[in-house]
Amino acid sequence: METPLAYRQLKSYYKALMPTLTEAEWQLCEGQLRVRTLKKGTMLQQQGTVCNYVSFVNYGLVRTYYLSDGKEKITEFFKEGEYTCDYRSFLTREPSISLIQVLEDTEVVETPYDGLQMLYREIPAANILGRLIAEKLFIDVCTRSEVQANDSIEQQYQSLINNRSWLIQRVPQYMIASYLGVTPEALSRIKARVNKRPLQSALVY
Amino acid sequence: METPLAYRQLKSYYKALMPTLTEAEWQLCEGQLRVRTLKKGTMLQQQGTVCNYVSFVNYGLVRTYYLSDGKEKITEFFKEGEYTCDYRSFLTREPSISLIQVLEDTEVVETPYDGLQMLYREIPAANILGRLIAEKLFIDVCTRSEVQANDSIEQQYQSLINNRSWLIQRVPQYMIASYLGVTPEALSRIKARVNKRPLQSALVY
DNA sequence: TAATTTTATTGATTCAGGTCAATGGATTTT
DNA sequence: AAAATCCATTGACCTGAATCAATAAAATTA
């Protein structure tokens, strides 16, 4: 056992989602897991390869993005306590379109595809876990789509400041711009607009 | 039993996803189901209410959409053999943002929320079904997002013609425009552009 | 601390698609 | 079949964001 400490957060996560999980079943789960520490800048998932792991972030920060016309488009950021993965590739076993890159020194606990399938077979409750993970991911991606479709970039940026200010602090602004789907220049101008009417910002929510 | 015929398609669907399903378990599933026939124009899901059913379309066609600034934005079309639902509302039990409207006379088989939760508890294999449905929906929404993010409206329209030509035939063009996220005028101009260079269209794919 | 690289800002220009408006087909209703 | 409604097309104009370009500021590295 490498660093039992690293599993503690994940174990409580599993336990919360699968209350019926016995200690023996947890041992079976734990046997599938691998802890990895990754330096800032490392690629956790390359484009064009099948995604073989779901990674639970113990500490650190990663981004998922893809290349369109050679330009990077960031789809999401994942920090400590969250799962990250190109789940589409993981599920379909097709090559990944997304890349995953470590933005800060990061520690992850990886669950391999085969190991997870084994858990689905051996532990009935694991299917509940799988269902809940897929459902959560689905809800998240729906919510994101709805926000993108309904809110202006300015509203979305304000919402980041209000609800996910750690993002603003931990990643450079051009990545925020990429995440919001605009150029760094455009986001800079939006900020300038917002700052010109400081009374408004106090009224948001 | 209302119209046993209506269940046949759904039963084979369930059987395919849950090979271990016994006849007794199927009976339990069937007991939860309700068949409904709906006239063109009917609302299958209203905005602001919690979505209580997953609906399997036996025949017909529906659209899901939401209102933004009073304008309709179509998110997807579902035809015979597909599930439709505001699955986000269904899962979270929060009011639905989406509306679902019947575009052709349609027959659906509805599975209520409570019934499905009961199945998850009573039939372990039902969690596999729930997992697979959530996974499929997740994959679909990812794929859609990737297409929207990467392909021009022209490419997306060509792709509809090549891969989902039934859509072009069964829904008016202004709905296609809404689905693609542009105005009817814009789509009309895109078609005009495409028709001006007919050699190109033969080369697509 | 100076040098270098990275990141953010601002200006000028361009362009795709939106909006507004008018017209002409299609389809449905009476 | 005539009237009315719905739908698609086309034109003129406008706007928001992309692009290109030049600095300025901030963060790293030497």
Image (cartoon, coloured by chain):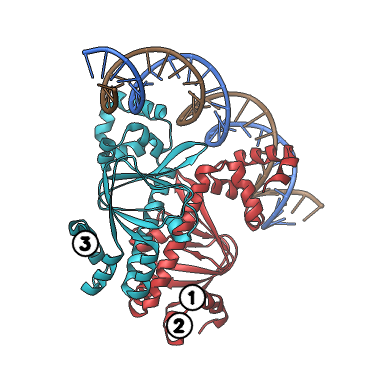
Chain colours: A red, B cyan, C brown, D blue
Instruction: Say which label, 2 or 1, has the lower sequence index.
Output: 1
Within-10-Å neighbours for mark 1: few <14, some 14–19, many 20+: some
Whether the residues at callouts 2 and 1 have beta carbons within 8 Å, the answer is: yes
Provide the secondary structure element on which disc 2 rests: helix
Q: Give the labeled residue for mark 3.
A: B1
**On the picture, is A6 further left or further right than B191?**
right
Check disc 2 and give the amino acid type.
Trp
Provide the secondary structure element on which disc 1 rests: helix
**In the figure, A204 relative to C16: above or below?**
below
Check disc 3 and give the amino acid type.
Met
Q: Could you tell me which chain the residue with mark 2 belongs to?
A: A
Within-10-Å neighbours for mark 2: few <14, some 14–19, many 20+: some
Query: Separation of disc 2 and disc 1 at Cα?
Result: 8 Å
User: From the viewer's perspective, is the residue at label 1 or at label 3 nearer?
Assistant: 3
Q: Give the labeled residue for mark 1.
A: A14
Query: Separation of disc 1 and disc 3 at Cα?
Result: 42 Å
